[in-house]
Protein backbone atom coordinates (compact mmCIF):
# COMPACT_ATOMS: atom_id res chain seq x y z
CA UNK A 1 0.00 0.00 0.00
CA UNK A 2 2.88 2.36 0.78
CA UNK A 3 4.37 1.78 -2.66
CA UNK A 4 1.11 2.69 -4.36
CA UNK A 5 0.71 5.79 -2.20
CA UNK A 6 4.27 6.82 -3.01
CA UNK A 7 3.74 6.37 -6.74
CA UNK A 8 0.61 8.50 -6.50
CA UNK A 9 2.75 11.34 -5.14
CA UNK A 10 2.24 10.88 -1.42
CA UNK A 11 5.70 11.33 0.10
CA UNK A 12 4.62 12.01 3.67
CA UNK A 13 6.07 10.49 6.85
CA UNK A 14 2.97 8.30 7.36
CA UNK A 15 3.69 6.61 4.02
CA UNK A 16 7.28 5.94 5.13
CA UNK A 17 5.90 4.58 8.41
CA UNK A 18 3.62 2.25 6.47
CA UNK A 19 6.64 0.91 4.56
CA UNK A 20 8.52 0.49 7.86
CA UNK A 21 5.61 -1.57 9.17
CA UNK A 22 5.76 -3.76 6.06
CA UNK A 23 9.47 -4.36 6.77
CA UNK A 24 8.70 -5.18 10.41
CA UNK A 25 6.01 -7.69 9.43
CA UNK A 26 8.34 -9.30 6.87
CA UNK A 27 11.04 -10.10 9.45
CA UNK A 28 10.03 -13.76 9.71
CA UNK A 29 9.68 -14.30 5.97
CA UNK A 30 12.28 -15.65 3.54
CA UNK A 31 15.22 -13.35 2.81
CA UNK A 32 14.01 -12.57 -0.70
CA UNK A 33 10.71 -11.16 0.60
CA UNK A 34 12.52 -9.17 3.28
CA UNK A 35 14.76 -7.78 0.54
CA UNK A 36 11.73 -6.73 -1.50
CA UNK A 37 10.19 -4.89 1.46
CA UNK A 38 13.53 -3.24 2.31
CA UNK A 39 13.99 -2.05 -1.28
CA UNK A 40 10.57 -0.42 -1.27
CA UNK A 41 11.32 1.24 2.06
CA UNK A 42 14.58 2.59 0.63
CA UNK A 43 12.70 4.24 -2.23
CA UNK A 44 10.36 5.96 0.23
CA UNK A 45 13.17 7.02 2.52
CA UNK A 46 15.08 8.57 -0.39
CA UNK A 47 12.61 11.45 -0.52
CA UNK A 48 13.38 12.43 3.09
CA UNK A 49 16.75 10.98 4.08
CA UNK A 50 19.23 9.78 1.45
CA UNK A 51 21.60 8.30 4.03
CA UNK A 52 18.84 6.16 5.55
CA UNK A 53 17.76 5.13 2.05
CA UNK A 54 21.28 3.98 1.13
CA UNK A 55 21.59 2.07 4.41
CA UNK A 56 18.26 0.34 3.78
CA UNK A 57 19.19 -0.40 0.18
CA UNK A 58 22.46 -1.99 1.34
CA UNK A 59 20.44 -4.15 3.74
CA UNK A 60 18.11 -5.14 0.88
CA UNK A 61 21.09 -6.11 -1.28
CA UNK A 62 22.56 -8.28 1.49
CA UNK A 63 19.23 -10.00 2.05
CA UNK A 64 18.89 -10.60 -1.68
CA UNK A 65 22.39 -12.10 -1.85
CA UNK A 66 21.47 -14.57 0.94
CA UNK A 67 18.22 -15.60 -0.70
CA UNK A 68 17.60 -18.84 -2.52
CA UNK A 69 17.58 -18.39 -6.27
CA UNK A 70 14.52 -20.46 -7.06
CA UNK A 71 12.63 -18.62 -9.81
CA UNK A 72 9.65 -16.78 -8.45
CA UNK A 73 7.96 -13.39 -8.30
CA UNK A 74 10.73 -11.91 -6.13
CA UNK A 75 13.71 -13.56 -7.85
CA UNK A 76 12.94 -13.55 -11.57
CA UNK A 77 12.52 -10.66 -13.97
CA UNK A 78 10.21 -11.23 -16.95
CA UNK A 79 12.17 -11.39 -20.20
CA UNK A 80 9.66 -9.13 -21.93
CA UNK A 81 10.23 -6.45 -19.32
CA UNK A 82 13.96 -6.45 -19.88
CA UNK A 83 13.90 -5.35 -23.51
CA UNK A 84 14.71 -1.76 -24.25
CA UNK A 85 13.01 -1.59 -27.63
CA UNK A 86 9.50 -0.29 -28.08
CA UNK A 87 6.73 -2.87 -27.99
CA UNK A 88 5.72 -4.31 -31.32
CA UNK A 89 2.28 -3.28 -32.59
CA UNK A 90 -0.47 -5.86 -32.44
CA UNK A 91 -1.28 -7.59 -35.71
CA UNK A 92 -4.45 -6.39 -37.44
CA UNK A 93 -7.63 -8.16 -36.51
CA UNK A 94 -8.34 -11.30 -38.53
CA UNK A 95 -12.03 -10.41 -38.62
CA UNK A 96 -12.84 -8.06 -41.51
CA UNK A 97 -14.91 -5.07 -40.52
CA UNK A 98 -17.48 -3.26 -42.58
CA UNK A 99 -16.62 0.35 -43.39
CA UNK A 100 -18.35 2.98 -41.30
CA UNK A 101 -21.25 4.75 -42.96
CA UNK A 102 -21.11 8.56 -43.04
Image (cartoon, rainbow, N blue to C red):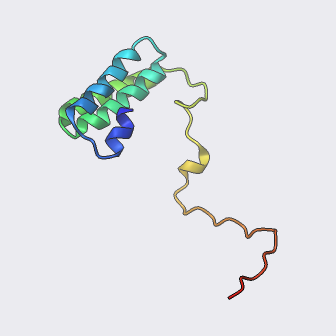
Give coordinates of residue 6: x percent, y percent. Answer: 32, 40
| Residue nearest the viewer, comparing 97 with 6 | 97
Residue at the extreme bottom of the image, as rendered:
102
Q: Is residue 52 above or below residue 79?
A: above
Locate residue 46: give its quadrant. Answer: top left
Corner quadrant of residue 71: top right
- Asked if residue 75 lies left or right of residue 3, the reply is right
- Image quarter in which the N terminus is found: top left
Towards the viewer: 19 or 82: 19
Determine the residue positioned at 45% across, 18% down: 31
How far across and down, in percent of the image, does residue 29 sit? 47, 15
At x 44%, y 25%, the residue is 64
Q: How many marks?
A: 0
**Image quadrant where one finds the C terminus:** bottom right
Residue found at x 64% / y 67%:
89
Identity of the residue drawn at 21% across and 29% down = 52
The answer, for residue 54, to whether it is visible in the render is no
From the viewer's side, name the closer residue of 42 and 4.
Answer: 4
Q: Residue furthest top?
A: 28
Measured as percent of width and height from the top left, residue 99 is found at 75, 82
Locate residue 68, reporting x and y percent. Answer: 54, 20
**Is 94 left or right of 44, judged from the image as shown?**
right
Q: Classify residue 23 by image quadrant.
A: top left
Q: Residue furthest right?
A: 95
- Mark yes or no: residue 33 visible: yes
* Name of the residue lying farthest toward the front: 102
Amino acid sequence: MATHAHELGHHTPPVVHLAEQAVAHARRTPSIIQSYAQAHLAVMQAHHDKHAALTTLTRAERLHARAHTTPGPFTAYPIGASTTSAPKPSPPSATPRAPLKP
